[in-house]
Amino acid sequence: MTGSRRRRWRAALTAALTAALAGSLVVLLGACGVVDTEDDRRAAEELAGKHFPGQLRAIGVRTLFPGSGGSEVTFAVTDDRDAVVRLRIDADRTDGTDKPDTALCDRKDCAGVLAEAVKRGRQRAEDFRALKGAFDACGYEVVALGPTGAPPYVVAEPTNATVTKVLGEIGECVQRWVTASGADSKAAKARASYVNVVSPSVADRRHRGKDSWPTLMRLTRPDLLASLTKRAYFSASYEIEAGRVDTTGSARVVRPRRESRKFGDTVQNAVKEQLRATYPRVVMSTYQWIWRLEPGRVDRQTGYVLFCPEPDTRGRCVNSDDAALVTTDEHGNPVGKIRLVHDVREGTGALRLPPH
């Protein structure tokens, strides 16, 4: 927006907030055009035309209200099909000029911010190509990426008979990725890497987006990630040391919130019943630890449940110093014996649960 137009909007917004008590806020905000980002986009396009002529094409814009002022403008890079550039810009100017360079981007000079955004967008595209090439070479298509470009999401449906093989194959993909990224890359210097594994049935129904979008825009969109994580999936982890990946890996199940709560309640209730024989007044902590698949199994997972032998003065279990190591089936029903572990916390601070 031009400065005068945005100032008129802010004045109208003040009036709208006052009118909220009368139930008129939504109507007034709509009338004032809160989500109108036309001038922010125009300013961003002028900046791009001046500093990167012919290289950037605006393909989207979203308002940053109410978290902050201005808008986020998304650009495609004309000579890089994979790259996407995002610029946060506020075209509200107080000096009365119409020069795009007087706009602010994250409260900084827009020319420098745009240059950094372009550099970052191009580098992320290069990083993605190294990742994609590595996974393509070992037979696992990358169907999505986390918001920052990692972790990758691939498609597989491991069973008890295949999970060791699948984890090993994906581990080889990770090694190829680390090697292709170079010794000085973040991937090579990391201590671990993660890959999310979704089932074919979920992947087939994912929100794919438009083919015309830059690859990194299409693969990191929130609606795509939401469509892949609305069902339980596996998260595989691989330790890295000096650029060498332990390709054996390990995995855990990541469940949607409601399903995770149900799993945790089942485990805690079952463990509580068993602990009552020793601790009649036992109280379970609501804390959920990480559950990992047992080697060679997808229907067995092991994790910790925290408890207090007796409740505190409010009847709760806070800063538990006791834990039970439990192996369960996929629904959270304990399988086999429960092992108790004591003195698992440093005072009231961090947990120090033994690895399992």
Image (cartoon, rainbow, N blue to C red):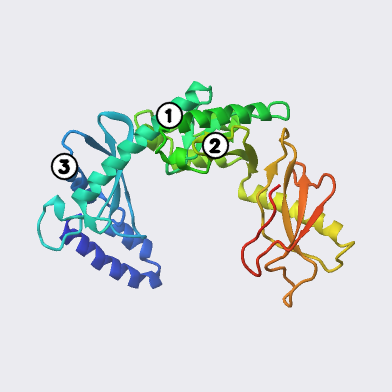
Indicate the secondary structure of the residue bearing disc 3: helix
Give the residue type that dot 3 points to.
His
Position of 258 compared to 339: left or right? left
Q: CA distance from mark 3 to mark 1?
A: 32 Å
Which mark lies nearer to you, 1 or 2?
1
Residue tagged by mark 2?
195
Residue 105 x, y percent position in the rendering: 25, 54
Position of 94 compared to 265: left or right? left
The number of numbered badges drawn on the structure is 3
- Residue 220 visible? The answer is yes
Disc 1 to disc 2: CB gap under 8 Å? no
Q: Earlier in the sequence, mark 2 or mark 3?
A: 3
Indicate the secondary structure of the residue bearing disc 1: helix
Disc 3 to disc 1: CB gap under 8 Å? no
Query: Is 63 or 341 nearer to us in this picture?
Result: 341
Residue tagged by mark 1?
180
Residue 114 x, y percent position in the rendering: 24, 46
Indicate the secondary structure of the residue bearing disc 2: strand
Q: CA distance from mark 1 to mark 2?
A: 17 Å
Q: CA distance from mark 2 to mark 3?
A: 38 Å
Residue 13 x, y percent position in the rendering: 29, 66
Q: Residues within 10 Å of mark 1 (few under 14, many from 20)?
A: some
Residue tagged by mark 3?
51
Disc 2 to disc 3: CB gap under 8 Å? no
Instruction: Specify the quadrant of the image occupied by residue 7.
Output: bottom left
Give the residue type that dot 2 points to.
Val
Q: Earlier in the sequence, mark 1 or mark 2?
A: 1
Give the residue type that dot 1 points to.
Ala
Residue farthest to the left? 97
Which mark lies nearer to you, 2 or 3?
2
